[in-house]
Structure formats: C-alpha cells, structure tokens
Amino acid sequence: EFFEEEPVGPPRRPAPAGVLFLENGGGKSVLLKLIFSVMLPGHRNTLGGASSGVLRKFLLADDCGHVALEWQHTLTGECVVVGKVSEWRGRQVSNDPRKFAEAWYSFRPGPGLSLDSLPVAEASAVGRPAEGVSGARGRRRTMKGFRDALMDAGKFYAHLDVHWEEIHDRWNEHLGDLGLDPELFRYQREMNADEGEAAGLFAVKKDSDFTDLLLRAVTDTRDTDGLADLVSGFGNKLGRRAELTAERDFTAGSVDLLGRIVEATDTRARARDIHAGAERRTRTLARRLSARAAEERGRTAELAERVTAAAHTVTEAESTRGRRALIAAELAYRHASLALTAAEKSAAAGRKELVEARTLHSAWQAAEAVLRHRAAADRSARVAAAIREAERDAAPALA
C-alpha cells in the first residue's frame, strides 16, 4: 500500500526503510550528531572519533541554530515535531561549554504551525515554499524571540500542545511521554560509535557483559548508588535467610495464636455487649409493658362505662322510636283521610263539570236545528205576510 498512486484513507505512512548513501566525508556522521543532539541531550554525541564540541563549531557568534525532526506514528499517522535551539550567550564564541545555551521543544503540527513554518525569522513567505527551501524571510529570531513566538502560537492554537524545556533530564522524560524512547537512540549511538555493524552492540563475551547491557537499558544511570544499596540489601537478606525463615515461622505461629486469642476476646466482648444490650432492652420492654397494661386497664374501665351508657342510650332510643312510629302512623292516617275527602270533593266537582259539559255539548248539537227552525219560521211568517198582503191587494178583484 506504500506504492498506491492515489492516496486512500488516512495520510500515507513513512517508508518502512530507507538508505542514505554518501562517500566518506559526505556528512552521515554529522547528520547523526544532529539527530542525537535532539534525542540524546547531555550524552556524548561523537561518532568516528570526532571532537565532542563539533556541534558548537557549527554556530557563529550571532547565529541561532535549529535542529528540527518530524516523527509520524506508523499506525495512527499522528505527527509530532521535536527540535533543539542553540546559541552563544552574550553573542561571543567561547571554548567554555557553559556559555553554549541549548533548549528543546516539541509540538504537534497542525493549522497555525508546522515543520515548514517554524518561526525562525520575523516574517515568513506567503504560500507553501518549495521542497527543501525554507519559508523564513526577514531578520532571524534569537532563542528568546523563537521561544516567545512558539509559546504565543501554542496559546493561540491549543491543539499544538507546545512544550519547551531547558533541562536534559526533564527533556528525556518528556520524550518518553511522547513515545520516543531515548534509549533506542543510545543503542544507535553505540552501534555507530566506530561506524561498524549493529551486531557489535550485542557481541558479549560473558554473562556479566550481557547483565551490564541489560542494567544499562532498564536502569537510570543517575541512580546507580540506589541500585547498589538495593542489591546489597537483598544480599544481606539472602545471607540471613535461615534465621529470617525461622523468625518468620515463629512470628507467623505467634500471630496465628494471638489472632485466635484476639478473635476469641472480640467474640466474648461482642457476646457480652449483645447480652447487656438484650438485658437492657428486656428491662425496657418490661417497663413499657407494665405501663401499657395499666393504661389498657384504665381504658377497659372507661370502655365498660361507655358501653353501659350506650346500652341506656339504645333503650331510650328504641322507646323514642316506638312513640315516633305511632305518631307517624297517626299522621299518615290523618293525611290519608284528608286526601280522601279532598279527592271526593274533587270527584264531585268533576262529575258536576262533566254534566255541565255534556249539557253544553247537547246544546251546541241542537243549535243548528234550532237555527234552521228559526229560519224556517221566519220564512213562513214572511210568506204568510206576503200572502195576506196579496190577498188584501186582490180582495177588491176577488170581490
């Protein structure tokens, strides 16, 4: 997958291996010195018998030297930049190593700062610089100016996780926190000390040499005295092993027996406490029961009196209920008698009204016949009157 034409998924990882081919004097050892000055601060960074102060010869009085390395995790692709800044104190070259100021830093590249945009100068070129060409322009920064610019970028871009250190031991611890083990680079330095093969590092002649190699790998060389004291202490303890074993067995047996006694004592104390507590609770319960019995007897007498009074009240209530039942029956009888009388009167009035209504109905039925009779009588009277008048008028003629 390292040779795919188009990138797929996360960023491409670094090549698993690489070869730097240069002739003698081409700068291979110098490149390793620069890398070791960042990853192995405070160690002897010499290769091929060169002077230990060769790195200081790279800087002039007014220079501020920078060595920056970018590492990428082969699994996650996460990158981290570690670097070193150095300059001469007072801007004067000296043979005194104490006047050679060094500091180390680390950050995680991202928006705002990367390996290609280190603030080594007061201005940077616009756009991405060409491959292998620095984008720095303008006046070069001093170590203090570079540190201020780096810390300002870390404050403005929190994701950069900027770290600055000026003490060798603390820088080594920080490299371990970043996952860059300086011990691996110490092996590289030892393997390249005589520019020989890597197998020379593990060419041991006896067991003690391999033990020394292992102790150097896992033990901090600053704490060898502590290791010696620890080994001496273990030796003394091993020398007294028989005595200590007998003392341990005696102590273990004594502790076992004393533990049983302590457990029995604790059990007896707990039993006594439980018994005393039960006795106190029993006495308290007896007092409460006596008080409750006296109270209940008083309540029983009171309830008996109340039952007697209730029986008298029930007797009186029953007699009162009998009298009230008789009164209610009499009232019901009288009410029924009055209702019967009123009903009879209402029935008589109804029958009278019915007779009148029937009479009125018969009168209304005879009204038409009466009207026809009256009309016929009127016509008969008019006809008789007309006849009489006609006879009266015709009398002379008849006569």
Image (cartoon, rainbow, N blue to C red):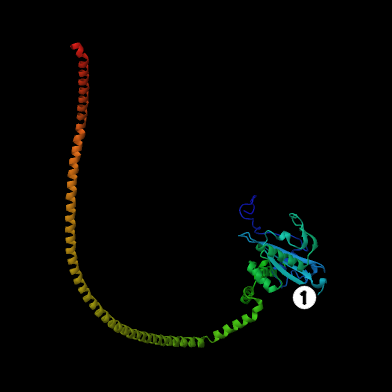
Residue at point 62%, 55% (across, down): 10
Asked whether residue 29 appears in the rendered view, the answer is no
Density class for disc 1 (Cα within 10 Å; few <14, some 14-19, many ≥20) is few
Instruction: Give x and y (percent) for residue 211.
Output: 62, 75
x and y percentages locating residue 266 in the rendered image = 40, 86
Report the side of 67 relative to 235 (left or right): right
The quarter of the image holding the C terminus is top left
Q: Is residue 93 above or below residue 375?
A: below
Q: How many marks?
A: 1
Residue nearer the viewer, 394 or 207: 394
Q: Residue 150 sits in which quadrant?
A: bottom right
Q: Is residue 245 left or right of residue 118?
A: left
| 192 or 396: nearer the viewer | 396
Residue drawn at point x = 20 percent, y = 74 percent = 312
Q: Which residue is mark 1?
A: 98
Task: Identify the residue at horizontal 20%, vertical 19% (top origin).
Answer: 388
Amino acid, disc 1: Arg
Q: Is residue 175 visible?
A: yes
Instruction: Give the structural element (helix, strand or loop) at label 1.
Output: helix
Q: Quadrant of residue 290?
A: bottom left
Depth order, front residue of 188/176: 176
